[in-house]
Amino acid sequence: MKPIWIVDDDQSIRFVLEKALLREHLPTRSFSNSRDVLSALNTSADDEGPQILVSDIRMPGGSGLELLEKVKAKHPGLPVIIMTAFSDLDSAVSAFQGGAFEYLPKPFDLPKAVELIRRAVDESLREEVAEERMGEAPEMLGQAPAMQDVFRAIGRLSQSHVTVMITGESGSGKELVARALHKHSQRANGPFVAINTAAIPKDLLESELFGHERGAFTGAQTMRRGRFEQADGGTLFLDEIGDMPFELQTRLLRVLSDGHFYRVGGHSAVKTNVRVIAATHQDLEQRVKDGGFREDLFHRLNVIRLRLPPLRERKEDIPMLTRHFLQQSAKQLGVEPKRISDGALTWLEGFAFPGNVRQLENVCHWLTVMAPSQVIEPKDLPPEVIASHATDVASAKPILLPSSPAVEPPAPVSPHMVVHSAPVVVATVGQPPVANAVGWEGELEQEALALLGSNANEVWDSLSRRFESRLIMAALANTKGRRIEAAHKLGIGRNTITRKIQELGLE
């Protein structure tokens, strides 16, 4: 592994970090100013450069922010950690805007500093592997078994001219499958023509599909070839076929039967050689039963059916797709691709994605524009993802403590609801009764008495952790995951809530 470069004019800081990182078997190289760093970067080969750059923000001969700007211009993928005093928070914001991986407040806790650097190293190594894979990314991505079935089907159909029906929810990538079927078929050199039958007005759809002759209707000043003619020798993709008007279904059936059709207003049959791939998000069998779709056309289209799974059934593909879309969005916008933390990926994997892959692509575009730093954390995710996660956590069933298997902890209390209950009197052998135990305080007393009566150990820590967990999660749900705002409402510091979230395993 390449070394971690440490830049600080304070020799004691360099010495402490060097020793701590060497104990973790992480090689280091130290510099006292930014000039030497830039000179070393210019003369080092790619495999001799830094894995991570850790730089102070205030140094003689050039600040850490200036160094960050110059490093990012030449090495946009290099994670940079900026060390700053607590009074330099404005500079820390500038560091994030300049593409810093994270900032490290001084004076820092050494184990936390090593942990941050280790996280940056792990992220850097993961991104190197991901970028190698992205360099050869195919037109479709997916490791889930359901997607592998789709890929195998595309391979088997590559030498066939048979009509294919693709079913799947909106946004699941049906057109991508159609394009892949065309690309890997014997018609690959021919045109691929796509038309969404639900997006074109009923009165214009017939002309779009079959073309029209001059003078066929008002405004038809010239002859126009339709999509069937345009796709001659190639593939015609009919998306949302379930929304096609009933009267047009008869004409489509005839084309599929013998390859002949008439332009609107025409009297001469036109022959076309087209492979038809249809797609729908609807239940066509039910549409046939309801009389909205011709049964003979359904059987003509439904020769081979491919079901494309929704994203919630292939969650193992979300990390790969997310990194792919982040790379794609960054390329479109001309900016450095952002990285995403494991915690943020876990939240995305837990999101239902009703809009499927298209929604994930939009989320990645949103993150490329809106995420404040180069590393996307859970708090940076769109509001709908954060709200969904907070709801899932709030509705999770309480877990029984191992030390008291017979006692169920009290239900979580919503921050918007005050629970009132009748006074409770608890009589336990060897213990005085508890009087006037009302609401959640009364339930807390009951829980404490039950645990103490069962000779459980560390009752204080057990109840404190449960109380703090519920309180923090309620605050995060109230602020839609915004930690600083949640800390402010709870009356604690930002560092305190971050530390508590880590200690309580709420990441």
Image (cartoon, helix red, strand yellow):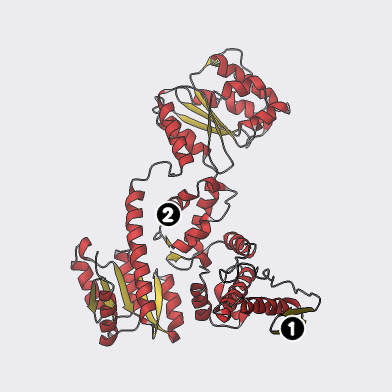
Residue shown at 42% from the left, 66% from the top: 374
Toward which corner of the image does residue 167 lie, by quadrant?
top right
Q: In the rendering, which numbered label is found on residue 323? A: 2
* On screen, residue 391 above or below 183: below
Kind of residue at badge 1: Val
Say few, some or many: other residues with alpha carbon within 10 Å of mark 2 (under 14 / 14 to 19 / 20 or more): many
Give the residue drawn at x 56%, y 55%: 351
Left or right of 265 in this view: 342: left
Three-letter amino acid code at the position of disc 2: Arg
Question: What residue would you read off at disc 1?
Answer: 434
Decide which of 259, 345 is in the foreground and name it: 345
Q: Position of residue 200 (x, y in %)?
A: 63, 35
Q: Please give the name of the residue rendered at 67% of the width and 23% of the height, measured from the top-left corner.
A: 294
The crowding category of the residue bearing disc 1, from other C-alpha atoms within 10 Å (few below 14, some 14 to 19, many at least 20), is: some
3D distance between C-alphas at marks 1 and 2: 57 Å
Q: Residue 414, image x and y in percent? A: 69, 70
- Could you say which disc has been placed on residue 455 in the image? none
SS class, disc 1: strand
x and y percentages locating residue 225 in the rendered image: 54, 24
